[in-house]
Image (cartoon, helix red, strand yellow):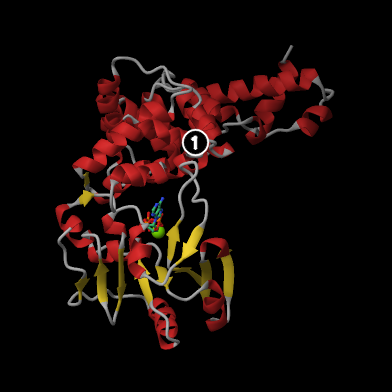
Amino acid sequence: MASKKYHNNLIINMPSDVKYIINTLISHGYEAYSVGGCVRDSILGKTPKDWDITTSATPTEIKSLFSRTIDTGIKHGTVTVMIKNTGYEVTTYRIDGTYRDGRHPAQVTFTDSLREDLRRRDFTINAMAYNDITGIVDCFGGMIDLKLKVIRCVGNPLERFSEDALRMLRAVRFSASLDFSLETSTMEAIISLAPSISKVSRERIQAELEKLLMSHLPQRAALLYDTGLMQMIFKENSFFSHTLSSEASLLSAALMRSPREHYIRWAVFASYVSANNIFKSLKFDNATVKICGNLIKHKSLPLPLKEPELKRCIVRIGRDIFGKYYLPYRKVLEYENLKHLEAISSMYNDIVQRGDCLSIKELKINGSDLAAIGIEPGRKMGDILNYLFDSVLDDHTKNNRETLIELAKNYT
Ligand code: ATP
Ligand code: MG
C-alpha cells in the first residue's frame, strides 16, 4: 500500500514514565516505541487507557535495566516494568508463529525488526509505533485508515482471521468503540470465516462482547448479525429463526437507549437475543448470572401503582437491585410506557427514603421479643414473623414494637 512510513511532524504527548522507559532502553542501544492502542488513541485525540511499549531488547535485557519488573508473559516476551505504582508492559519485537488451532500461536520468535512486530498486529490502526526521535512509524497505512475511519486487517484478512478467529470480534468491537466501519474485504472475510469463532474460548468471547456492549455505540451489536458471528457464538443454545434481521434491529435500538451499565446492557442483550443460558454459556461470574437472571425473569412483572403491592415487587427483586438496575432495565424495554415507570420510580424513591421495612430483619421486633411473650422458636414463630412482615407491608405505620407485639398476641 502506498503510504508514508514516518510521520515526523506528529508529536504524541507520552506520560513521563513511558518516556523514561523508552529513553532508558534507547540510551542502552536498543530501539523502543510506544505501540498499538495508545498510539491510535493519541492520534484520535483520546486519552489512552494504558501504554504498551515494544522494544528490540530481549526480556532478560529489559529486566537488567529496571529495578522493579514482573515476568507477566515472559514466554511471549512481555515484562511489566513498575514505575512507582504503575505497571507498563514492555514486549520484545516478535513474530507470532503459525497458529495451530486458530487460538494460540504455536511459538513466538523474537525479531530485531519493528516492521515484523507491527505486521503481526491485527488492524492497521493498531499497527503503528511512536517515539519522540522517529515520530510515527506506520508501515501498513494506519494513518490513512484513521482518517477514513475504517477497520482494515494488516495483510490478507482471510489469513489474519484464520490465525486468530477472535480478531473478527475485535473488528466489530473496535467499530463500536471508535465509530469506524469495517473495510469491505475485512467484512467479507469475517462473513466467510464466522463459523471459526467456535474455536475461540468462551472467556475471550465474553471479554470482547463486554467491550462491545460497554462502548459508546453498543448498537453496533447489529454487526454481529450481519457478519453471522452472533448466530455462530450461540450456535449450541440458540433458537434463531427467520426473523433475525428484525431481532438485530430491535436489539440495537434497545442497546442504544440503555444506560452504560454492565448488568443492564447484558440483561437487555439477553432479552432480545434468541439463545438460552447466555450467561452460563459465556462463563460469566456469579454476580452477573444472578443479577441479570433476576432482571430477565421479572421482565414482565406487573408493577402496580399502589404502595403495598409495589413493595411486594421490590421485596421480590431486592431493594437495591430494583432501583439501580431493574427500573432502568424496564425503562429500556418499555420506552413507550415511560410515564407509568416514572410514577413507579418516584413511589419507589418515597418508600426507600422513608426507610420502610422491606425485610423481616427490618421489623421492629425480633425472635427474642416473641419468645418473651411465650412464642417458642420454630415453625410457628416463622409464620408469625411472616404475618407481621405482611401486615407492615400493607401499612408501614404498624412497624413499631407495641403494635407488632399486639398483632403477634392476637395471631391464631
Ligand atoms: P484497548 O483500547 O481496548 O486496550 P488496544 O488496541 O490497546 O485496545 P489490546 O487488546 O490492549 O488492544 O492489545 C494491544 C495491541 O496488541 C493492539 O493494539 C494490537 O496491536 C495487538 N493485538 C492485541 N490482540 C491482538 C490479536 N488478537 N491479534 C493481533 N494483534 C493483537
Ligand atoms: Mg490496550
Residue 177 position (above or below residue 276): below
Residue designated by label 1: 321
In the rendered picture of this protein, how many numbered marks are placed on residues?
Answer: 1
At x 22% / y 48%, what residue is drawn?
180
Q: How many other residues sit within 10 Å of disc 1, few (<14), some (14-19) or many (≥20)? A: some
Element marked by disc 1: helix
**Relative to 70, residue 281 above or below:** above
Tell me, yes or no, if residue 350 can be seen here: no
Q: Amino acid at mark 1?
A: Ile
Query: Looking at this rendering, what residue extends furthest in the bottom direction?
Result: 27
Would you identify the image quadrant in which residue 69 lies?
Answer: bottom right
In the picture, measured across the screen, residue 380 lies left or right of residue 127, that is right
Locate the N terminus by quadrant: bottom left
The residue that appears at 75% across and 20% down in the rendered structure is 409
**Where is residue 50, by image quadrant?**
bottom left
Residue 248 at what x, y percent from top left? Answer: 28, 27
Q: Note whether residue 199 is visible.
A: yes
Judge by depth and name the residue closer to the eye, 249 or 186.
186
Q: Which residue is at a point 40% across and 67% down the rendered structure image?
A: 51
State the residue in front, 118 or 43: 118
On the image, the x and y values in percent for residue 67 come to: 57, 82
Left or right: 117 in relation to 191: right
Residue 64, quarter of the rendered image? bottom right
Quarter of the rendered structure image containing ligand 1: bottom left
Name above or below for residue 237 compared with residue 125: above
Whole-percent x, y for residue 226 in the image: 26, 30
Tell me the quadrant of the picture where the C terminus can be found: top right
Frontmost residue, 194 versus 363: 194
Residue 224 rendering spot, x and y as whole percentages? 32, 33
